[in-house]
Image (cartoon, grey):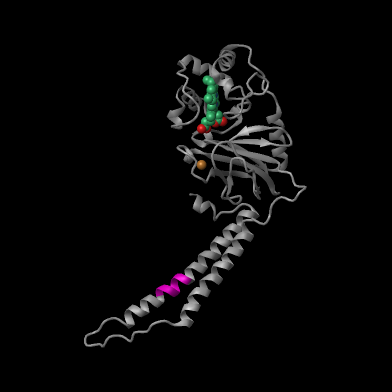
Amino acid sequence: MTGVLTLQPFSPEASSIAHLFIAVLFVMLAIFLLVSTIVIVALVRYRDREGAPEARQEFGSKRLEVAWTVGPIVILALLFGFMIHTIQVADPPLSGEKPEIRVVGHQWWWEIDYLQSGVVTANELHIPTGRPILIDIEAADVIHDFWVPELGRKIDAVPGHPNHVWISASKAGDYVGECAEFCGDEHAWMRMLVVAQAPAAFDSWQQEQLKVPAVPSAGEAAKGAKLFSDQTCVNCHAVTGTVANQRIGPDLTHLADRRILAAGAAENTPANLFRWLKDPNSIKPQTHMPNFQLTDDQAHALVAYMETLR
Ligand SMILES: [Cu+2]
């Protein structure tokens, strides 16, 4: 799927990668055709025939050897130059340019911090359309790799060594991102939903995210809120406006606004949330979220509470 996405660019950054890919493909095709033609001609022309004498043997040809050494070097050097130019290795942020967003890879989910507004979320990256966004890429544990094929290049998330990447979206819509560096058991379920929105829609999304959800005072949801702080949930999660402020797991302040759970392993529906709380492994084997052996009643109350987090 992603092989195809690379060829469906929705940003200038991704377009130049797609163009380079196609250009390289044609260079490769030309070399392939040249080599196969020479091989086929040689096979047919010099094949063994009844009564034919042994073919003339030649050893060493300076001209040929120089040609097949220098030719590939020149081709590879050119491709290398185009590649460096295209993926913007030489395009780091200027000294005055501050990243707007920080994305931190965790096993196996993405933490997303909006550095100016203070919004914190997970696995669902919202960006405004129409302009390049500078993102700071970090890792909390092992090496991950941030990649949204339709919007830009790949970049490694390396513990202790922040990297930067520019991405942009020329059209509003949903794009799939993923971790592109094997990072352990659940690497394949380390996806990201990128939601590109017109600037006004993005601003109102950000304003919504800054709101502190009311703590429910009655019913199932209130029971769930109490369970949330009594159980160990607060040791790993944060919910603004409550005592929960840990960042080991995803921030849950606006969980109910998000469309995916567990970095894309499931859709965010009450039924899946229930399944997740009863047994996270049933959705994402090996996940670092423990199984708390909750009863059905407890899990239902927690789901009722989590559905208020918007
Ligand atoms: Cu990974």
Task: Please identify the quarter of the rendering in which residue 232 is found.
Answer: top right
Does residue 33 show up magenta in the picture? yes
The residue shown at (51%, 45%) is 181
Q: Position of residue 5 (x, y in %)?
A: 53, 51
The residue nearer to you, when weighing 244 against 33, is 244
The residue nearer to you, when weighing 29 against 246, is 246
The relative height of residue 4 versus residue 99 in the rendered view (above or below) is: below
The residue shown at (29%, 81%) is 47
Q: Position of residue 97 (x, y in %)?
A: 75, 47
Q: Which residues are magenta?
A: 31-36
Q: Is residue 247 left or right of residue 50?
A: right
The relative height of residue 132 versus residue 58 in the rendered view (above or below) is: above
| Residue 129 visible in the current orientation | no
The relative height of residue 255 versus residue 102 in the rendered view (above or below) is: above
Does residue 209 show up magenta in the picture? no
The residue shown at (58%, 19%) is 305
Q: Position of residue 222 (x, y in %)?
A: 59, 13
Q: Quadrant of the C terminus?
A: top right
